[in-house]
Amino acid sequence: MRSITNALVATLTLGIAVIAAGDKSSQTGRDSGDPTALIELLRNGSDDETEAACEKLKELGKGNQAVAQALRDLFCDQKEIGSVRISAITLFSGIAGELLQPGEFADSSFTEFKKVAAARQAPLLVRCVALQEIEVIARLSADPDQAVPFLSGILCDKSEPVELRSHALGMLISGRRVNAAAVLRMLGNLAVDQSESADLRGVVVEMGAYFFLLNDIRDDWLLPQLLSIATDETEALRLRSKALWSCRTRLLAGANATDELQRRAATWARKMMLDRKHRKQLREDAAGLLIHLRGGGDEAVFDLIDVLKSDDLFLHEYVVVSLGEIGAAARPAISLLVVIAQNQGHSNSLREAATQALARISPEDVDPMP
């Protein structure tokens, strides 16, 4: 019996010694300045060990190419799990800094990140982050557009996930481009391609306007594309509204739009505003674009008065509010607004809107609602 007890005690003592040695080894790994040991803790450590290793790597890594390269290699390791790779690239982004200035390390990083972004077996988030790193390196290089061909390839590849393609789009139009007009033409082709994902086309339509502004492109080429989407009744309502929004935001209002295009857009917008077969949201968007194109002048006011004179109550409140926003130039609408404000057959919200519009256009014409 005593021999069995002694054996158990010996076994327990040995187990405790092994655990203690393991704890000491982990502590040594956390406290060492050896990137290899710290990287190993990122891979296989407990949550506390991983957190401590991250802090140590941040401390050691600033401007340290050995640490940055170890983190880059861990991120690019296709056999590693996604969460570890994301931790690695997050640390890399925080410490790489000047190391990504033009040079051998930046060039090799650019190449490696392209491989990750192109790897279809990699987790989607990993691929999206790789796209970001590619663009960061390109921005710091002598050729800021060097990432454009790769990003364009991802964006135009219909076999890639829409989320990845949208991310590539975001990177592509995140700044000024040397050949911005070519990028814009590509976006225009995507926007009108009905075989494309509706979600991606919506993003292209919205972001195309932003890119146009950012690069101050003096080219009307995208405008007809947007108008063709907005006027095509086979397109989804949501996409048509986004096309209208892009037009109204900038593209048809500034010096970059020809007079002929502005006239064409105004004619179309008025037609859609008055066409009762269209949904309310689309008609309101068209009215907003029309007011924008008319510059809030007499033509816009008389277009809106035509709506108020009709029995088309669907848009009356929107039109009344719009007249108030136009202000003094909307004086020709005063008599109609007075009638609406005093007509107890109308809804309270419409009458209140008419009263507020009169206050903005001509305060002396405002009478309390009966």
Image (spheres, rainbow, N blue to C red):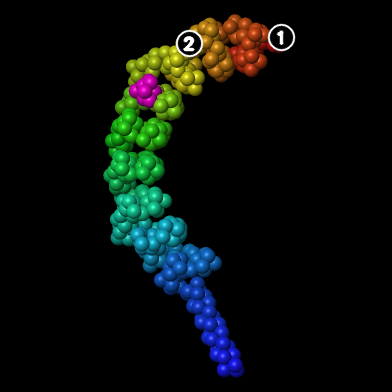
Q: Is residue 348 magenta?
A: no
Position of the C terminus, as image quadrant, is: top right
Q: Does the image show residue 175?
A: no
Q: Earlier in the sequence, mark 1 or mark 2?
A: 2
Position of the N terminus, as image quadrant, is: bottom right
Q: Which residue is mark 2?
A: 303
The circle drawn on residue 156 is: none
Quadrant of the rendered image containing residue 158: top left
Which residue occupies 53% across, 15% down?
A: 315
Identify the secondary structure beneath mark 2: helix
Which residue occupies 33% across, 41% down?
A: 155
- Relative image position of residue 59 (x, y in whole percent): 49, 66
Rendered position, 22 above or below 244:
below
The magenta stretch is 228-235
Q: Is residue 232 magenta?
A: yes
What amino acid type should be assigned to the residue bearing mark 1? Pro
Rendered position, 79 above or below 142:
below
What amino acid type should be assigned to the residue bearing mark 2? Asp
- Relative image position of residue 245 (x, y in whole percent): 44, 27
Which residue occupies 41% across, 51% down?
A: 125
The crowd level at tag 1 (other Cα within 10 Å; few <14, some 14-19, many 20+) is few
Judged left or right of residue 322, residue 36 is left
Identify the secondary structure beneath mark 1: loop
- Label 1 – label 2 distance at C-alpha: 29 Å
- Relative image position of residue 363 (x, y in whole percent): 65, 12
Q: Which residue is mark 1?
A: 370
Q: How many marks?
A: 2
Which residue occupies 36% across, 23% down?
A: 234
Callouts 1 and 2 close, C-beta under 8 Å: no
Residue, far front:
1
